[in-house]
Amino acid sequence: MKALVCILLLLETFVFVVQQQVDGGLNEKEISQQISSEDGRQNPPQTDTLRAEASTDRQQYCDLGIPDIHAALRELTATVTEQKENIRDLTATVTEQKENIRALETQLREQQMFILEELNKKNYEISNLTLSQVELRKENRDREIAFSAALWESGDGYIGPFTTEITLTYKNVFTNIGNAYNPITGIFTAPLKGAYMFRISAYGHGGTAAGVSIYKNEERVVLAYAYQPQNTLNSSNGVVLILKVGDVVSVRLWPNARIYDSQYNRSTFSGYLLFPLK
């Protein structure tokens, strides 16, 4: 405020001088003389003293005000500079936070992608596992092969003797899992490659031999045979065979031999898959 008053006083003096020059075209010397003359006529000595005092006050006032302006300006400049520094620091902090946010967003996207990939892998594994379980169940069903049968469905009696071998048909079926045995033809047909177990039993009476053989395709493999002049005859045998898909197994009655069966199911033919083979 002090500085403003000082400046206004200086401006007032300057305007007065310029106005005098414009109005009268006076030069600096004339202006001084006129001012002195007018001061002599109009102002008593007291006025000059008052003017001198006022001029001195104005000078002192300005001398006191100008340093205050400079100090205020310096303080204001320092404050502005400090605020600029604070703004720069704040801007740097905001920029750093933006970078951190972008980094976190990138990390979050990567984690989401990783989680999605893991979920897709798990779903694929579960899908494959489900398919594998279905295939395994189907494969296990395919491996469920077993049968067992006796000669007569009802009643009792002999079969044979005949002059040539005949294929026996075991009609009283106890078990036929996989339906690989045909009770009409008496033939077992292998549905898949594997190791199979087969067993036969032959029962008869003395005076005529009781003999049967297991055939793989057209090859005789094992036999069950018994003979004595009188009383009952009983014989059995078994074998493990490696069969390919489509191989057949059957039981044939020997020539001039006979076997007997009844409700007690003493003459039987059985078989089952031990394990599949590649």
Image (cartoon, rainbow, N blue to C red):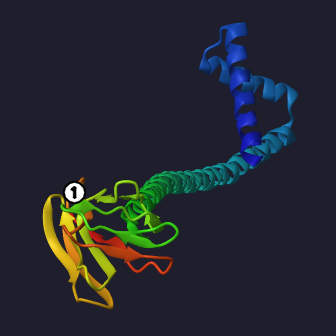
What is the x, y in percent for residue 233?
Answer: 30, 87
Q: Is residue 119 visible?
A: yes
> Between 221 and 179, which is closer to the camera in this rendering?
221
Q: Give the amino acid at mark 1.
A: Asp
- Label 1: how many Cα within 10 Å (few below 14, some 14–19, many 20+): some
| Rendered position, 36 above or below 178 | above
Q: Can residue 111 be seen in this view?
A: no
| Rendered position, 10 above or below 65 | above
Q: Which residue lies furthest to the bottom in this view?
A: 231
Residue 183 occupies which quadrant of the picture?
Answer: bottom left
What is the x, y in percent for residue 54?
Answer: 79, 44
* Residue ID for mark 1: 247
Q: Which residue occupies 32% across, 79% down?
A: 201
Classify residue 181 as left or right of residue 86.
Answer: left
Classify residue 173 as left or right of residue 212.
Answer: right
Residue 168 occupies which quadrant of the picture?
Answer: bottom left
Residue 28 occupies which quadrant of the picture?
Answer: top right
> Between 160 and 271, which is closer to the camera in this rendering?
160
- Classify the position of the C terminus by image quarter: bottom left
| Rendered position, 72 above or below 7 | below
> Between 176 and 62, which is closer to the camera in this rendering?
176
What is the x, y in percent for residue 185?
Answer: 34, 54
Secondary structure under the numbered disc 1 in the rendered image: loop
Q: Which residue lies furthest to the left in this view?
A: 219
Q: Which residue occupies 70% across, 34% down?
A: 10
What is the x, y in percent for residue 203?
Answer: 34, 81
The mark tally for this picture is: 1
Q: Which residue occupies 29% across, 77% down?
A: 199
